[in-house]
Image (cartoon, rainbow, N blue to C red):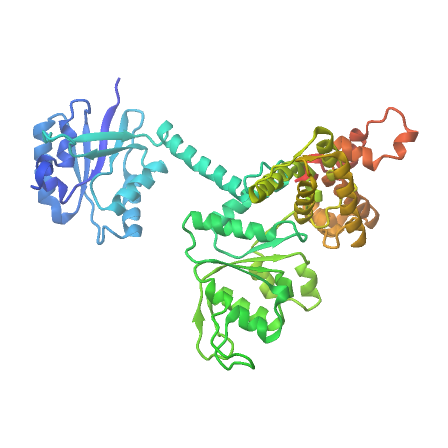
Amino acid sequence: MALKTVVIGMLGTTLDRGFSPQRWDRWRPTVALGQHDDLRIDRMELLHGRAHASLAAAVTEDLAKVSPETDVRRHLFELKDPWDFEEVYAALYDFARDYPFDPENEEYLVHITTGTHVIQICLFLLAESRHIPAKLLQTGPSRVRDRDPAGIYGIIDLDLSRYDRIAERYRRQAEGDLNFLKSGIATRNAAFNAMIERIERVGAESAEPILLTGPTGAGKSRMARLVYELRARRRLVSGPFVEVNCATLRGDAAMSALFGHRKGAFTGAAADRTGLLRQADGGVLFLDEVGELGADEQAMLLRAIEEKRFYPLGSDDEVHSDFQLICGTNRPLEKLVAAGRFREDLLARINLWRFRMPGLAERPEDIEPNLEYELEHFAGKTGRRPRFNREARELFLGLATGSSASWRGNFRDLSAVTMRLCTLAGDGRITTDLVREEWERLEDGWQALGGGTPDNAPDDATLLGEVLGDERENLDLFDASQLACVIRECRRARSLSEAGRVLFANSRQAKKNVNDADRLRKYLAKFGLSWEAVQA
């Protein structure tokens, strides 16, 4: 047996009266529902206010003339303000809750053409959430000159492919935003890609402060600017991107640069100064090396974040600035708090969204795509496009991803060595001799800075916390130290086997037919860890 068709809709207090301008003069949306030969309506649930009872009765009579088989049931639906979202949604929700839906015998259509825009939106939301188990029915006047009083209609099923195509459009936009945050580089590191997905979500949904940590040269400044540009593309910010390195700010100059000053506030203040916080109004303020801020600047910054107001230096009048704050640091702020050099309440305020930008040595699989990016960047700047020969490329990638490559300067090192290789490739070809020469120069620089491990690399406690969480507290000191060493090597290596070869290089000589990857897998399993968990 065919299902009965039931339409739920609001009385159109203007459109259902009919009006004269041009071709709409004969189209009345509720009445027109009964004038379509291919749309049979068995029952019409018509909602209306007390003040429009007579119009509802007239519409009922006219619908009966054009569609005698349609049973019209009128419902008194009283609203004090049909433009009040909360009131409208609550009233329609109550109606849906009390209505005796019978989906086994009836199919339902929600007419979203009549009523205020707020009513239409609420009907859509209730249908989407399945509080009203219905498809959407949208109608309109005829587009042709014969002024057909039936007009046109369309049925939208939120569960079918049309809705899926809308979701697919949003998915493609999200993928484009992720690619944008990665500067178009096809990064391969799973942990980094997962972090970028989280940053994209936060950048699109939250205006709260973001804290970017990680070693120097890991890309904190670039990521901050990309987050700003992503928000600007989505029209979430209207102001500029303002960047300042806090390590360059000292004394009155720091207060003046950040918060501005009035003429005569201190010696040398010959004119008023706006200040960076005021300049960032409506946009994004990026404070790099935020741990270098002095105590007074930290106190004023905290108030500016929380209240969006502050006093310029030497002024009795507050100024307002509504900006999103992004902070960067390569120093452990918690240790600065413990030493009394950074405010605990400020750290709590800027630490809502925290992302650690990993160093290049922790992302060996991303060196090759980033190398390609640097080659293209050089070509774009100079018009020259040097190329590696096959042997030179293999040599460079082998050295760059090996366990001895510390990449102390991270992407700055990669950019510098790529520029030197391209510049010195006189015939446009980068050779193995040139790679060895420049790699030796790079390693000499690392050694001059104190060896292979950067001072700002994560300590053992931080590293273990990333993979074990609170469980790290249960480890003996010996196990903790050994496990941290293993995790570091795993993150440098491109595979479980490569990490095993490095970790068991000496003992392998005494044990024949030993599988290094299996030994490492079993060692990690003792702590409830897997290769994937360590990498992520």
Q: Identify the image quadrant of residue 43.
A: top left
Q: Can residue 160 be seen here?
A: no
Q: Which of the image's four quarters has the N terminus?
A: top left
Relative to 108, does residue 294 appear above or below in the rendering? below
Q: Where residue 196 sits: x, y (%)?
A: 56, 43
Which sits in the foreground, 316 or 431? 431
Residue 278 lies, in percent from the top left, at: 46, 66
Near-viewer residue (176 or 368): 368
> Looking at the figure, which quarter contains the C terminus?
top right
Count of numbered badges drawn on the protein: 0
Locate residue 42: give its quadrant: top left
Residue 238 at what x, y percent from top left?
41, 56
Furthest residue in direction right, as rendered: 510
Left or right of residue 86: residue 385? right
Q: Is residue 494 left or right of residue 268?
A: right
| Above or below for 250 versus 3 | below
Asked whether the viewer can see residue 492, the reply is yes
Q: Is residue 49 left or right of residue 450?
A: left
Nearer to me, 464 or 474? 464
Measured from the top left, where is residue 217 in percent x and y? 66, 51
Q: Residue at the spot x=46%, y=80% of the render?
A: 316
Residue at (23, 27) in percent of width and height: 5
From the viewer's perspective, is residue 424 above or below residue 323?
A: above
Q: Which residue lies furthest to the front in this view?
A: 427
State the residue at coordinates (7%, 41%): 20
